Image (cartoon, rainbow, N blue to C red):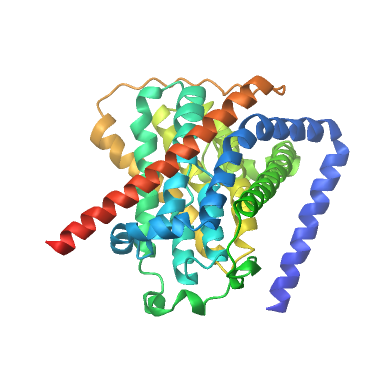
Amino acid sequence: MNRKKYNKINLFYILILFLMISIIKDPVLSIDSARSGLNIWFNTLLPSLLPFFILSELLILSGFVKRFGSFLKPIMKPLFNVSGEGSFPLIMSMVSGYPIGSKLTCSLRNKNIVTKVEANRLIGFTSTSGPLFMLGAVLVGMLNSPHLKLLIIIPHYLGIITIGILLRFYNPKKNRYKRSDSITYTEKTNSDKSPKTLGYLISQSVKDGMNSIILIGGFIIIYSVIIEVLLNSKLIDLFILNISKVLNLDISILKSIFAGIFEISIGSQKIAMLNINIFYKICLINFVIAWGGFSLQSQALSFISQTDISSKIFIISKFLHGIFSSFYTYIFYLIAYRNISIPSISFPTIIRKEYDFNNWISTILSSTKLSIGICIFFLLLSLFVHLIFINKKEA
């Protein structure tokens, strides 16, 4: 066991050394890719995700999620074998996308709102892409095919629901364990039962939200550099060339998939620009979106590392999500799109190269409205399910 750990550490050192040498050899490429990653983070991710992080943390700290999430137990328990509170990260993730679901699942675990077993189930099916990225960035910006929205939306969410249903059978004998028997890691305030003031809740939520969004920015920048360095490496070119000969696949397809394994946006863009039938493009893109890329997975794993949640379950679930998404794409294509003529046209996404403060303000306002709307929807859904469940009991 020690030998394996030693080999992993050495492999990590070799990769770091390789990246450092590549950056020194071509510093212009590294600076440009880092700047591109910074622009994406500032112009898109920061204003889009920050309101979700702050508001969701505020609702969790204030006890809102625990109170109203329990109303959704009649839905979550039969389907996914988790408590009703698990519906909050699932709903937020389906609407806002990566990495909201993983972050909220870890927050619920850290605050001891869900058990370790429930958290391990949740982490596998609360990590999804948002419709804004799939419909706006991919279908419109990259593929110019908005009429194919169902071919990308339905397989993605069907895949994650399938993962959730499968994970309901994970460790069924441990369902009897109480939350009080589990261990929390980062939240030391759980033992403090004194009431928290509104000022404390807001400041703590802003602090946690800013820490999370800055961490995400660091991953975006470093992975932008890593991907460009690897794709411009002769060693990687030689490796992909040999794989293409073995599998008899075009080298451009393998390069696009390779990019998608590391980063979802760059991989999707490269796949969209391939000279292949658009159906095959969507199958590959659906896998890449569901897989999430090492960049998004690293963001999620950084949150998971602060808990006792299993990272293996998360990674395996993301791979299976990719497989199921591609499989459902094929099935749904045969059902609904088989006799429809689909042209193979692609247009790359235009990424802003400058900081656009007007767009930044507009995006953060829109994101804030959306996050508030989702929370209101969560409240209404909880009350609706609760009323139905009460009426059934009385009947």
Q: Position of residue 98 (x, y in %)?
A: 53, 44
Residue at 47% x, 46% y is 93
Q: Is residue 107 left or right of residue 21?
A: left
Q: Position of residue 276 (x, y in %)?
A: 46, 28
In this rendering, the count of numbered labels is: 0
| Quadrant position of residue 175 | bottom left
Nearer to us in this view, 253 or 182: 182
In percent of the image, x 35 and y 34: which residue is there?
Answer: 151
Please tell me whether residue 250 is drawn above or below residue 181 in the rendered image: above
- Residue ID at (88%, 40%): 24
What is the x, y in percent for residue 213? 66, 44
Q: Is residue 214 visible?
A: yes
In the rendered structure, the answer to whether residue 272 lies left or right of residue 263 reads left
Residue 63 location, x and y as percent?
49, 58
Quarter of the image where the N terminus is located: bottom right
- Figure check: 129 above or below 319: above
Residue at 54% in and 26% down: 273
Q: Is residue 100 left or right of residue 12?
A: left
Between 295 and 113, the one lying in front of the other is: 113
Query: Which corner quadrant holds the C terminus?
Result: bottom left
